[in-house]
Image (cartoon, rainbow, N blue to C red):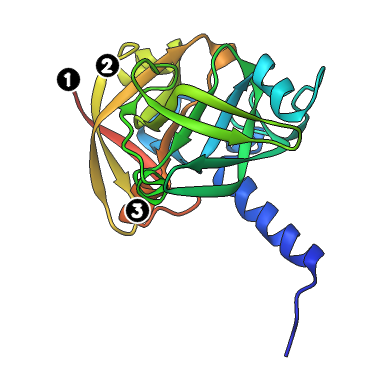
Amino acid sequence: MNYYSEKDIRDIVAKVVNSSLGAAPAAESRPKAADSKEGILVEVSARHVHLTVEDVEKLFGKGYRLTPKKMLSQPGEFLSNERVKLVTDKGFMQNVAVLGPERKRTQVELSATDAKTLGIKIPVRLSGDLDGSGDMLIIGKEGCIKAKECAIIAQTHIHMTTEDAQVYQVKDGQRMSVQLASDRPVVLENVIARVKDKSKAFLAMHIDFDEANAACVNDGTKAFIVKRW
């Protein structure tokens, strides 16, 4: 019988976490706006946390800053080496990824299944739309914080440049119906276009694990816009 060492297990877990957070694809494989008929790359986002500078210091120590472990597909964003524990009155989750860089407001992004595991009811929102969202106790190596109005289920969205938006004939904030070309094809409704300057966006659709599992999404799955609202 083969036994895995503690290091082997850590390496396996790290590989799974990194791949689920959408590590940046090689430049030559990145879809371009002119390739609209080829579909939009689907990236699956695992549960994760964004922190303010102040909260990073409360969780990891005075003067501490997030340290990049792996760059993600969206320009400037990275998976950090830091991890936190999420706690509610009814449950907890350990070793939750922290994404950088630091933000203006702390945010916890969960799937609906995660929310049920933690025993909380939280809204489906776009990133940054946190007013009236869920509270969460976040624990780091050096401290903990009670983050108010921070927890959401991320609204399914597509990151686009202004050039991409012209090709796909959508505007920032526009709603779409999107077909996932997977082993179990489904159409996701109410998908939001998030349009930014070319230097700040990489064409990709972001879904969570609940959606990915329902549609049997694999690496390289593409999405196609079938309706614009």
Residue 167 locus on image (x, y percent): 36, 18
* Residue type, mark 1 in image: Trp
3 or 2: mark nearer the eye: 2
Question: What residue sits 27% from the left and 52% below the top?
Answer: 185
Is 146 left or right of 215, judged from the image as shown?
right
Per the rendering, the mark at residue 90 is none
- Disc 2 is placed on an element classified as loop
Residue 178 or residue 37, whichever sits in front: 178
Q: CA distance from mark 3 to mark 2?
A: 24 Å
Residue 61 locus on image (x, y percent): 79, 25
Residue wearing tag 2? 174
Which image quadrant for residue 2?
Answer: bottom right
Residue 69 or residue 88, whichever sits in front: 88
Question: What residue sits 33% from the left and 59% below the top?
Answer: 183
Evaluate whether residue 222 shows in this view. yes
Give the mark, 1 or 3, whose residue is nearer the N terminus: 3
Give the mark, 3 or 2, whose residue is nearer the N terminus: 2
* Residue type, mark 2 in image: Gln
- Disc 1 is placed on an element classified as loop
The quadrant of the picture occupied by the C terminus is top left
Give the mark, 2 or 1, whose residue is nearer the N terminus: 2
Residue wearing tag 1? 229
Q: Residues within 10 Å of mark 3 (few under 14, many from 20)?
A: some
The quadrant of the picture occupied by the N terminus is bottom right
Per the rendering, the mark at residue 182 is 3
Residue 126 locus on image (x, y percent): 37, 22
User: In the current view of this chain or complex, which residue is farthest to the front?
Assistant: 89
Is 198 left or right of 59, judged from the image as shown?
left
Question: What residue sits 57% from the left and 14% below the top?
Answer: 200
Report if the CB atoms under discs 2 and 1 are less than 8 Å apart: yes
